Image (cartoon, rainbow, N blue to C red):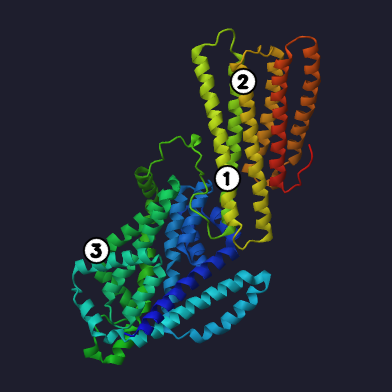
Amino acid sequence: MSLMIIFKLLGSLSLLMFGMKAMSEALQKLAGPQLRHVLGAMTTNRFTGMLTGMLVTASVQSSTATTVMTVSFVNAGLLTLAQAISVIMGANIGTTLTAWIMSAGMAFDITNAVYPAFLLGIILIYQKKYRYLGDFLFGLSFLLLGLGTLRTTGVEMHLGENQALLDFFASFDPDSFVTTLIFLVLGGILTFCVQSSAAVMAITMILCSSGALPIYQGIALVMGENIGTTITSNLAALSANTQARRAALAHMLFNVFGVVWILFIFRPFVDMVCGWVGYDVEMTIASAGREAFLANAAKLNFVLAAFHTSFNVINTFILIWFIKYIEKIVCWVIKPKSIDEEEDFRLHFITSGIMKTPELSVLEAQKEIQSFSERMQRMFAMVRELLTLSSTASGKKKSNQEVEFNKLYSRIEKYESISDSMELEIAKYLDQVSDAHLSDETKAKIRAMLREISELESIGDSCYNMARTISRKYQGKEDHFIDRQYEHLSQMMELTDQSLSQMNRLMGGRKETFDVNRSFNVENEINNYRNQLKQQNIIDVNNHEYTYAVGTIYMDLVNECEKLGDYVVNVVEARMGLRQHES
């Protein structure tokens, strides 16, 4: 075998893998937002979930993309784990379309048809409106060119006449169960190493259609590919959250179960599929002659595709009735992490790197910002509790109350550190997303999100400033606030909490249904109340109701609440797409 033929083989495999990747990414960009709505709306029961997974995967030509999307929706609370499992089952059926495309590409010489497609693709790419369609045509053309080159290279290699290769495959007993297991494991290892089941499927098709690899070993390789893809997704999910790891494990259980039951009826099942396609299992070169043998072997591409589809369809219709049990098993195997997630600064939704569709990446980031926003309101609630604890101190501080105060203050300190980390991590993620080719609408969303996280971090700073002020007063020698001051602070903090609640209602819902005037009204109330308390404070200090030092600390807390209210309004304006106004 010459060096040039080896390079042609590896180069055409590279073209195939690149074409598949480019085509998949272009389809995802074309259908990005619609896919999200389809997945959210069409998963009402296990059957619609399965159909959705099948259609989406057939559309984007990537079961991995469908699985990643599905897991992100589970994290975002749009799907339950049971619904996600049904979608993943459907994705396994949808991905079999790839095998049919490849078997057609191997059976016919389609290389001449790709050149007009390349021309049309480059014209569309330079027209902004149709650039994703152009990307898709380019990807498909590369895929078909790779397949066509593979086909001609396979013919040039004369694999069916290569005695060393024939002797190697002949050294395995075709009737042995061990041989089937060896090729199954080999298929899994190859897929894991190459990171592309399509490439391994192409190699299998070349070997089988040339007559070098017997059909039973070829089918065993295909079964191994099914498991190899799930190993990759399980390793990718190791750094992800609990639900992502459970979905990846469910995918693996599904494929492993399928391989186990097919092994019991392996030969009869393969013979049945060969019968459908019209392939003669018994034919040899000696009995039928070279031309008839090769014509028969050429049907093996369709045998592999038919097996791949029928195997996944039957496996899905067996397991679709047991989704609840699969969910219980994966939940039992993968338990939630024992750490208190509330006190952990790890991001919950942005876990699996940048997703292929910018719209979905933006959805992930939006859910993370919503979580950030809710966390800031919980932090403010701790500040209110800290003030309450400080107000109950009279005379000598009780030791257990002091311990409680210090413990709560430490939690607020930790939350401030968490808010800094969350801002940096989300900003870094959005920066990576913005490197992709984005629509103007998505760019505007990312700009708004960067503004949101900056203002949310400022809310965290405000909460921490208030906590430090309360702690300074609690630990110091200043007199305590009088009852009226506590009442005023309580009322001011209640108004501030209302503004935070309005903000979280917006972050968790649809902005079209949100009345932004409510947030503006609360902010006006806060501003007016601050001005009123400022005037009253001057009068009270002059009347010696409390010392100037106490009045200063008191006004620091009032002013910080007013500042916090401004940050909240800035978040609301960013989310609504409004310009920042002067407060």
Give the mark nearer the N terminus: 3 vs 1. Answer: 3
The Cα atoms of the two marked residues, 1 and 2, are separated by 29 Å
Q: Amino acid at mark 1?
A: Leu
Report which quarter residue 543 is drawn in. Answer: top right
Give the mark nearer the N terminus: 1 vs 2. Answer: 1
Q: Amino acid at mark 2?
A: Arg
Of discs 3 and 1, which sits in the foreground? 1
- Establish if 66 lies above or below 116: above
* Label 3 secondary element: helix
Q: Residues within 10 Å of mark 1 (few under 14, many from 20)?
A: some
The reply, left or right, for residue 456 in relation to residue 269 is: right
Q: Residue at x 68, y 41 (%)?
A: 571
Q: Residue at x 77, y 21 (%)?
A: 533
* Label 2 secondary element: helix
User: Which label was assigned to residue 424?
Assistant: 1
Reading the image, the residue beneath label 2 is 472
Q: Nearer the viewer, residue 281 or 526?
A: 526
Reading the image, the residue beneath label 3 is 264
Q: Residue at x 64, y 23 (%)?
A: 469
Image quadrant holding the N terminus, namely: bottom left
Q: Residue at x 39, y 54 (%)?
A: 235
Report x, y in % for residue 79. Answer: 51, 49
Report x, y in % for residue 220. Answer: 29, 69
Image quadrant holding the C terminus, namely: top right
Q: Nearer the viewer, residue 335 or 526?
A: 526
Give the mark nearer the N terminus: 2 vs 3. Answer: 3
The Cα atoms of the two marked residues, 3 and 1, are separated by 54 Å
Q: How many marks?
A: 3
